[in-house]
Image (cartoon, helix red, strand yellow):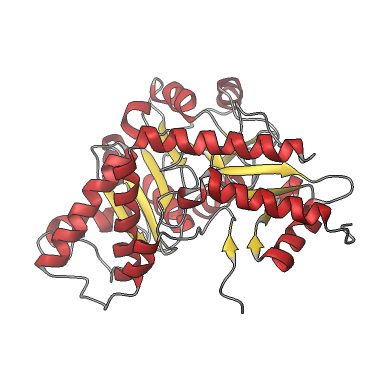
Amino acid sequence: MKDSWRLMIPGPIELAEETRAELARPLVPHYGAEWTRFHDETIDLLRRVFLTEGPVLAIPGSGSAGLDAAIGSSLGKRDQLLVLSNGFFGDRIAEIARSYDPGTVVHEVPPDRPIDVQELEAAMAKHSGITSVALVHSESSSGLLNPVSELTEWCKARGLLTIVDAISSLGGVSLRMDEWGIDLCISASQKCLEGPPGLALVAVGRDAWCRIQENDSPGWYLNLRVWHEYAEKWADWHPFPVTMAVPAFRALRKGVDRVLQEGLDRRVSRHREVAAFVRRELGELGFHPLFPEETASPTVIAVKGRSDLSAIALAERLKTDHGILIAGGMGRFKGEVFRIGNMGPQATEERMGELIEAVRSVMSSGHETE
């Protein structure tokens, strides 16, 4: 398998040189005073990215493991979850939730528009007994951004627990966990946080901890109550219940350092400005954005193919002729659009300019493109 692709997909991303170097360092134990100090310092830095005063747990696994942990740990026998879905990863949340409670309520919104408060109100009006609401911030299957702050504010005013998938947004899109009233916020290491795949990140607010402690939730590995217990009883040498993924965690630390050195506000602006640049440049080539700027995710750019150069054909030509990997559409948009990851080191006009020049080259090559 070729290992020199230029990754322009929506994660995992290409890593900065210092982050790659961290992965090559000799292994160290995942326990002891030195490691625990490093771990705790890194968790404190992650709090600054989530903008929360609550605990953040780094769980070896994918982002879906974090969602599984958050949902399974927070749903008690008397709780009912409402999932707001307008895409593949909203449906993923629903699939996970139904594995715990087949009665989970799912409110589907068309995938071509963001979820708004009116949709939330309509769903709540149809179902009594809802205690929690879950949704995706940046729906990376389509590149659509949901207005999380408006939705969580509405939920918080009514005493509803909120669970937010920020896997493709944290570190690239404005997100303020405590200020917005998010109770459980889930992300992962391999996207805007500039780490390799392998770590789910679960930030837990005060109200969520109260709910979790009250519940007799099943399971062990993905039970946040277990993680909380070990964080307390083994705090001085091993503040987690399992073997930590040492290389991934150390590399994530490098990524988080880069995020905070740049500054969250500056970083968010960079991702937004570069996304607008890419949409504008590709639009001039006849590849029109799937969504307008005001509802499009800054970290996942979804663009329609042309009648003479389909999304599928363009992706294949970029791969074979230029060694560049972009992603195709998912769900309803499969075959219609291509998706570009605009995350971390990829989110610069220089890097994106190289991709755009490759697209121009494909268009001018004169080869069959259908």
Question: Residue 19's x, y, as percent?
Answer: 36, 62
Q: Identify the image quadrant of residue 295.
A: top right
Question: Residue 98's x, y, as percent?
Answer: 55, 50
- Write the residue at 75% across / 50% down: 360
Question: Residue 318's x, y, as percent?
Answer: 71, 60
Specify the quadrant that holds the C terminus: bottom right
Q: Is residue 75 visible?
A: no
Q: Identify the image quadrant of residue 152.
A: top left
Q: Is residue 150 visible?
A: yes
Taking 120 as reference, is 66 left or right? Answer: left
Q: Is residue 279 above or below residue 157?
A: below
Question: Residue 75's x, y, as percent?
Answer: 41, 45
Q: Is residue 173 above or below residue 348?
A: above
Q: Is residue 24 above or below residue 165?
A: below
Q: Is residue 239 above or below residue 191?
A: below
Q: Identify the image quadrant of residue 32.
A: bottom left
- Write the residue at 38% across / 25% down: 159
Residue in front for this viewpoint, 165 or 8: 8
Specify the quadrant that holds the N terminus: bottom right
How many numbered marks have been drawn onto this rendered protein structure? 0
